[in-house]
Image (cartoon, rainbow, N blue to C red):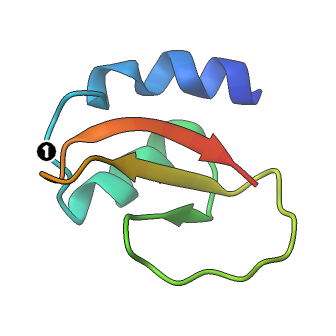
């Protein structure tokens, strides 16, 4: 699945509150094993297969990035 396809697949999550179970759901839907939630530590290495979940100040999912 390409990053563009993943963005389309994950659109239903945008605007919903982040909960720890979201990471597992994203991994299951995308087949990617590296999903990073908000405020989680991660390495600085470049990894285009890694998905970062972006949230706003209230914990609502606003989007996703890859690296």
Quarter of the image containing the N terminus? top right
Residue closest to the eye, 26 or 56 = 56
Q: Residue drawn at (37%, 65%), measured in percent from left and top?
A: 38
Q: Residue drawn at (28%, 52%), measured in percent from left and top?
A: 22
67 or 10: which is nearer to us? Answer: 67
- Asked if 7 appears above or below 59 in the picture, the reply is above
Dot 1: element: loop
Question: Where does residue 7 sit, x and y in percent of width and height?
Answer: 56, 24
Residue drawn at x 28%, y 41% as measured from the top left? 61
The C terminus: image quadrant: bottom right
Q: Is residue 1 visible?
A: no
User: Residue 14 appears in which quarter of the rendering?
Assistant: top left
Q: Is residue 63 visible?
A: yes
Residue 66 in percent (x, y) is at 69, 47
Q: Is residue 63 left or right of residue 46?
A: left
What residue is shown at x 42% (from left), y 48% (from top)?
A: 54
Left or right of 42 on screen, residue 41: left
- Where is mark 1, residue-wise? 17
Residue 65 in picture, x, y percent from top left: 61, 43
Q: Looking at the image, is 13 positioned above or below residue 25?
A: above
- Give the farthest residue toward the right: 46
Q: Is residue 17 left or right of residue 41?
A: left
| Mark 1 crowd level (few <14, some 14–19, many ≥20, 10 Å Cα) | some
Number of disc labels: 1
In screen coordinates, is 13 left or right of 35?
A: left
**Residue 60 location in percent, x, y?**
19, 43
As displayed, is residue 30 above or below residue 54? above
């Amino acid at each position: 699945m390409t990053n563009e396809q993943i963005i389309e697949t994950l659109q239903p999550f945008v605007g919903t509150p982040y909960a720890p179970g979201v990471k597992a759901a994203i991994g299951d839907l995308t087949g990617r094993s590296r999903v990073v939630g908000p405020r989680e530590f991660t390495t600085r290495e470049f990894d285009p297969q890694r998905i970062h979940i972006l949230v706003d100040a209230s914990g609502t999912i606003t989007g996703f990035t890859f690296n």
